[in-house]
Amino acid sequence: MSEESNSFTNAFRKFLVNEKLDSRYREKLLAESWGELVGKPIASRTSNLYISNKILFVKLTSAPLKQELNNNKEKVKELLDKDFGDLFHEIRFI
């Protein structure tokens, strides 16, 4: 990464923090990255994804998938914790 792009990245991050937009921006990044993080089969059955009161809500269109993800909630949380763990403390599949 060049010094110029690094300084732009730092300035952008400071702007987001100063304007209190950082968590909202990262929530959008999570939504955009969802398919890459969990895979195409899960992403194709996800109709909505949002964070409210430090809870990640994932709305699914498949009841069997919802049950499977509820059974493996900790694995999904571990997968997301690396990049987005500070945004939420709990996941709910709805």
Image (cartoon, rainbow, N blue to C red):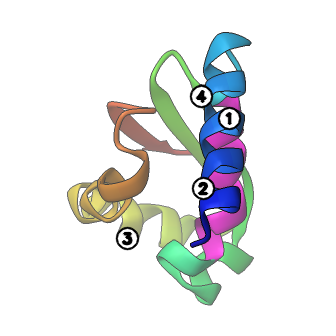
Identify residue for label 4: 23
The spot of residue 22 in percent (x, y) is 63, 28
Residue at x-position 67% and y-position 53%: 29
Instruction: For the residues labelled 1 and 3, say whether their Cβ atoms are less than 8 Å apart.
Output: no
In the picture, the quarter occupied by the N terminus is bottom right
Q: Amino acid at mark 2?
A: Asn
Label 2 element class: helix
Q: Are marks 3 and 2 in contact (CB under 8 Å)?
A: no
Distance, label 3 to label 4, CA atoms, is: 28 Å
- Residue drawn at 71 percent across, 37 percent down: 12
Cβ–Cβ under 8 Å for marks 1 and 2: no
**On the rendered structure, is 1 left or right of 20?**
left
Between 83 and 55, the one lying in front of the other is 83
Give me the C-alpha separation between circle 1 and circle 2. 9 Å
**Which of the labelled discs sits on residue 11, or is there none?**
1
Q: Is-magenta flag for residue 21?
A: no
In the image, what residue occupies the spot 34% across and 62% down? 76
Q: For this rendering, which residue is in front, 33 or 14? A: 14
Which of marks 4 and 2 precedes in the sequence? 2
| Mark closer to the chain start, 1 or 2 | 2
User: Where does residue 7 sit, x and y in percent of width and height?
Assistant: 63, 47
Residue at the image point whose x is 64% and y is 40% from the top: 27
Q: Which residues are magenta?
A: 23-35
Q: Position of residue 4 (x, y in %)?
A: 69, 58
Q: Residue tagged by mark 2?
A: 6
